[in-house]
Each structure stands twice: as C-alpha cells, then as structure tokens.
Amino acid sequence: MKRLSFKYIAGALTLLGALLQACSGENGADGRDAEEVNVDSLATVIRAEVTETLWDTLYAKPYVDTVYKILFDNAFGTAWMDSTRQALVDSLKQADYDSLYAALYDSVYYDIYSQSVIKQLDAYKWTVKEGINLAFANQYPLMYKDYVNSSGDIYPVPVSVIVRNECPSAISIFDTEPCNWKKIMVKAWITDWTDTGSVSGIVNPDTTDVFAPPLTFDMAKAAKIKAPEKVNIQIRAYALENDHEILFYSASEPTTLYPVQVNGSELQGVKNRNWWYGVWVTPNMDSIPNILNDLKKKLPSGTVKVYQKYSDDETVAESSKRVVQAVYEVLQARKITYLQNNGAGGTGQKINYPIEVLRSRDGLCIETAVLFASILEALGMQVFIVNIPEHAFVGWRTDRNSNTLDFVETTLIGGSSTFAYANSSGIEKFNEQLDAGNFESGDAELIDIEAVREYGIVPNDIP
C-alpha cells in the first residue's frame, strides 16, 4: 500500500482546519496549550476525518466493506482512542501546523496499517545448528546446498525460520480481510562474531516458506578461540511494506562455536565430505614469499618453473619432480617434527593450519600434507591429498593435466630421510591401496585440490 497521494491534500487541509477548531480555547487562544485542548472534541474530529480519508484511500481496493469494518473495529475502538489521545495532544504541542498531517499519518495511519499487515503472518524456528564448526562455518551455504533431513524436508544450516502467510477460509468475502502475498525479509547475526545476514522472498496466501539467512564469520577472531564458546544467534523477521520493515518475529537461539582447527562432525549427506580438507590448504599464507625465495636458491638459475622443462632435464615430469624435491628440502631445513597419532584428520580431531605448523615446527600427517599441498598449489602445481586409512600424504600431476601422478611421503620432512626415499615411500603406499581396491571401495581417496576449488571450496583465511 502506498502513502496518500497528492489528491488528498485538500482532505488534509480540511482535517487541519477541523483540528485547529477542536484545539482552540473559548477565548480563541492558541489551542496547542495542553490545558486548553478539548481531547473529546479532538477525538471526534479525528475519528470522522481520518476515517473518511482512509476510506477514500482504500476505495479502489477489493472488499472495501470488510477493510473498513476491520479498521473501525480494531483501530478506532474505545481502548485504542484512550491510549492514543495523549500522544496526539503531545504531537500538537510539538509539531508545526504545516507538519501536523504528516505527524498524524505516521502515528495513526501507519500504526493501523502495520497491525493489519502482520495480523496474517506467523513465523517459528526451523533449524538452529547446535554446534557450529568454525572451520566450515563460512562454507555452509555450499556444504549444505540442497541438503534435506531424514523426512525429506529442506534443512538449511546454521539457521532458518519458517514463515507462514495465514489466510483463514471465509464463508463470504465479508467475513474476513482480503489475502495478499507478502514480501518477507529475515535477518540473523551473532553479535561480535558475524555480519548481519539477510534473505528476502515472497510468501503467497495460505502458504509457508523457509528463509535461511547466511552468516559470515570473522575468521581472524575465530582463529583466536581455543575452546568451545557458547553464543546466541539473533533472528528477526520483517514484512516489507510501504518502505518500512515491519517486525513480526524475534528470537535469540543458543549455539556453540568450536575452534577453527577442529575437523568437526557434520550432518550425514554432505557431498564430498573429504574434499573439505581443502579449507586447510592455504596457498595465500604469509610465509609463502619466504618459502619461494628459499626455493629459488635450490633450483637452476634461481627460477621456479612449473610444468616447464629445465635445460638439464629430459622431460617436464623430471622438472616437476625437481621442484617438489626443492620444496621437501626447504621444509626439512625448518626441522618440522612429525607427530605420530592414530587417524588422519578424523572427525573431531584438531588440525593445525600450515602457518601454525611452520610456527610450532611440528605436525601430524594430515598437517604436513596440507602444508606441502599449500606450497605446491601456491606454485601453480596440480596437487592431491592422498587420504588412506589412518594416514595422508601428497601427490601431484607430473605434467599439466596429465593422468600420471607422482607421490611424496610428507611426514618424512621431520627426519633425515632423503627426498628419493620419501618419493619411493609415497609411491609404495599408493600402490598398496590401489592393489587392495581401496580407491574403488572408497576406503581411500585422491582429493584433487584443483577440483575442490572448482567445486567452490576456498581456503580459510587464517592470519
């Protein structure tokens, strides 16, 4: 519904004249003095004039009799007038006469209209994820795209509400107000942790829809927490009408944030679950320039060639292996200790990011793998994480888009083993899994980081 148009200016002037008359004292003194305002007369004038103006505004709408009845019964009842009189008196004392009509519109007409709009709307919580794993939080729109629950219902995370446009059945058009579609906006946020996510859409009469505003977390802050932290998700639902956001639902729902290093459990049905190791592969970490400088010192002519042949090599594959060897030796020189454990980044396991591994100078198998993969991706090589039962290491395409892969056992950077030994060890482990049929069964997997990026999984920005 739009604001009153220009043709109602005359009506507004008439209303102003009547108000001035109702608000004048017996001696003709200024009626804005609160002690001289005849509020009973004022109420009578407003009842007649505002009702007539509203009637004219709504005349072209369907079911005029019904709309008028609702406005009269709900808005101009005795209780409403009693609670509104003083506000109108106060507005007369504060407002210039030129702005009186606008003040009346905002305080009376819009209030009536807002109540009418939200009368047929209802909302309730649909999903609130009880535990938010910050490693994946900013990936949730992709991770849970098209996800449904066990009943086949749409199940967006981390938060969503259902909005219903309730239009009760009527025996005749005079029994209820007309039903119209409603434009809805739902907002959500976690104070001090996220931006305000919002989503909007249309809800038709006698229908429901799910609204799931996305939350974008501050990863710099997320990287600092070391233990689970309880927070509340704030949710608001608005009807968008007449250039206003009319609030009709508000909630504050509890959840728990888990540190960004935790490989948290996610709902069953998430596609390509192991691909999400890609958030730990961070080719833009701060240490990459220093590592690149060290690599140049180990390569012919101080140049890092990716999928290009060095003059001393016969094939691109040999040159690619030369680059990987240089990466191995640069990391080995940093004396990163391998920490043995059971599992390779299993559910609930803490996985430090490459920048953290470089700082602490120690790492689990999955941590040395994502560190090595981060550097190779930064160089532009097509790299794989080889995920096998209880272990992980790294592979790479020997030439761009080649189907031939080579491998390196990345945990050996923590000792005195040569690259040649680490290379042969990686090849041996891969062949063992291949011969056992584990890649076919799904017990082992080649996680192609290039495919991971094309799918939309991006690195976490960890300072």
Image (tube, rainbow, N blue to C red):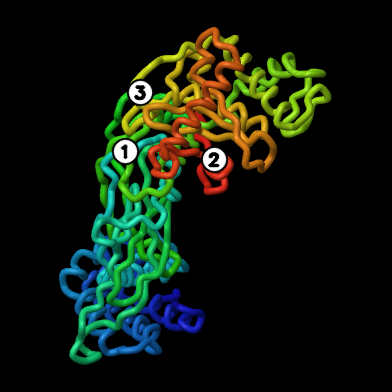
Which residue in the structure is indicated by mark 2? Answer: 448
**How many numbered marks have been drawn onto this rendered protein structure?**
3
- Please name whichever residue, 352 or 436, is drawn nearer the observer in this view of the structure: 436
- Please name whichever residue, 252 or 51, is drawn nearer the observer in this view of the structure: 252
Which residue in the structure is indicated by mark 3? Answer: 226
User: Which residue type does callout 2 highlight?
Assistant: Asp
Mark positioned earlier in the residue sequence (3 or 2): 3
Q: Residue at x 40, y 83 (%)?
A: 57
Tell me: residue 165, above or below residue 396: below
Is residue 210 something one can see in this rendering? yes
Distance from Cα at disc 1 to Cα at disc 2: 22 Å
Mark positioned earlier in the residue sequence (1 or 2): 1
Mark positioned earlier in the residue sequence (3 or 1): 3
Which residue in the structure is indicated by mark 1? Answer: 265
User: Which residue type does callout 1 highlight?
Assistant: Ser
Within-10-Å neighbours for mark 3: few <14, some 14–19, many 20+? few
Q: In the orientation shown, which residue stands out farthest toward the front? A: 435
